[in-house]
Amino acid sequence: MEKLRTYSLLSVALLISSGPVIAANIPAIANDFPEISVTHVGLLTTIPSLFVILGVLIANRLELLIGKKATILTGLGLVLIAGVFPALYHDLFSLLFISRCLFGLGVGLFNRLIIQIISDMYHKNPGKQATVIGLESAFEGLGGICLTLLVGQLLKMGWHTSFYVYALALPIFIAFLIFVPSDKKELNRREEVTTNSSYTNNKRALQVMIGYGLLLFVIVAIFINYNLQITPLILEKISQLRQTEAI
C-alpha cells in the first residue's frame, strides 16, 4: 500500500513537462490552418507555460479552500480534458488555442503542490522524503521523454491523433484519487498559519513567486523555441537529402 501511494503521487510528475511534447505537430497544424500565421500556431506549444504561472498563483488560494489533494485532482482533470480536446475537435484554431491555455492552467495547479504534499507525507522520515523528491524530478524528466516518443508514433496517424497522449492523465487521476490520502488536518493547520501571517510577508512571498515564475517562463520559452525551430530544420534537411539521392 505504501508503494502504491508513493508511485501514485510520483505519477503526477510525468505530466509536468508534457506541454512541449507536441512541438513536432506544429508544421502539420500550420499546413491545416494556412490562414493562421506560423507564429500563432507555434503559440500552441509556448502558451501553456504562461498559464502554468497563472495556475500556480490560483493554486495558492484554491489549496486553502479545498485542500492539496482536491487541487491536484482539479489540475489533473483540466489536463485530461483540455489535453485530449484537440484530438476530438480540431477544426477551429481558436478552440485549440483555448484548450492549450486550460492545459497549462491545469499543470500549474499541481506543479508546485507535488513537492509540498511529498514533504507533508514524509516529514517524519527525512531520508525517505529526500528520496521521493529526487524521484519526482526523475519522473518529470522521464515523462517528457516518453511522451515525446509516443507523440512521434501517434503523429503518423495525424497530428490531432497525437493529442491522445494526454489520456495518460486518466489512470493517473484514478490512482491519485484512490491511493493518496486527503489532507484535511493539514488544510486546517495551514488556514490557521495563514490567518496569523502578516500582510508584509504574504506580499513579499508573492513578489518572489512572480519573479521566479517570469524567469521560468523565459527559460521555457527559449527551450521551446529551440524545439519549434529544430523540427522544420530536420524535415528540410531530410527533403534535401532525398532530392540529392534522387539526382
Image: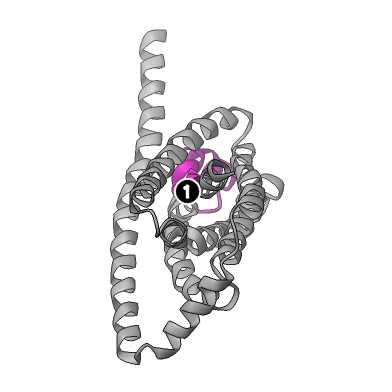
Quarter of the image for the C terminus: give it: top left
Q: Does the magenta stretch include residue 30?
A: yes
Of helix, strand and loop, which mostly describes the magenta segment? helix
Q: Which of 246 and 142 is in front in this view?
A: 142
Numbered marks: total: 1
Which range of residues does the magenta coloring cover? Answer: 14-36
* Of residues 133 and 146, the one drawn nearer to the viewer in this rendering: 133
Residue 35 visible to the viewer? yes
Visible in this render: residue 247?
A: no
Query: In the drawing, does residue 18 fall left or right of residue 201?
Result: right
Q: Is residue 198 magenta?
A: no
Mark 1 belongs to which amino acid?
Ala
Residue 1 in the image: above or below residue 187: above
Residue at point 59% right, 39% down? Answer: 165
Q: How crowded is mark 1: few (under 14 residues within 10 Å), some or many (20 or more)?
A: many
Q: If the image is split into quadrants, where does the N terminus sit?
A: top right
Instruction: State the SS at label 1.
Output: helix
Residue 73 pos. (x, y %) = 61, 60
Q: In this view, does 207 lie to the left or right of 110?
A: left
Residue 145 percent across, percent down from the top left: 43, 35
Residue furthest front in the image? 124
How is the rendered protein coloured?
one colour
Q: Residue 91, image x and y in percent? A: 68, 50
Q: Residue furthest right?
A: 88
Q: Is residue 199 above or below residue 185?
A: below
Q: Taking 71 as reference, is 126 left or right?
A: left
Q: In percent of the image, x 40 and y 58: which residue is there?
A: 124
Q: Name the residue under label 1.
A: 13
For this rendering, which residue is in front, 136 or 122? 122
Q: Where is residue 215 in the image (x, y as percent from the top left)?
A: 28, 63
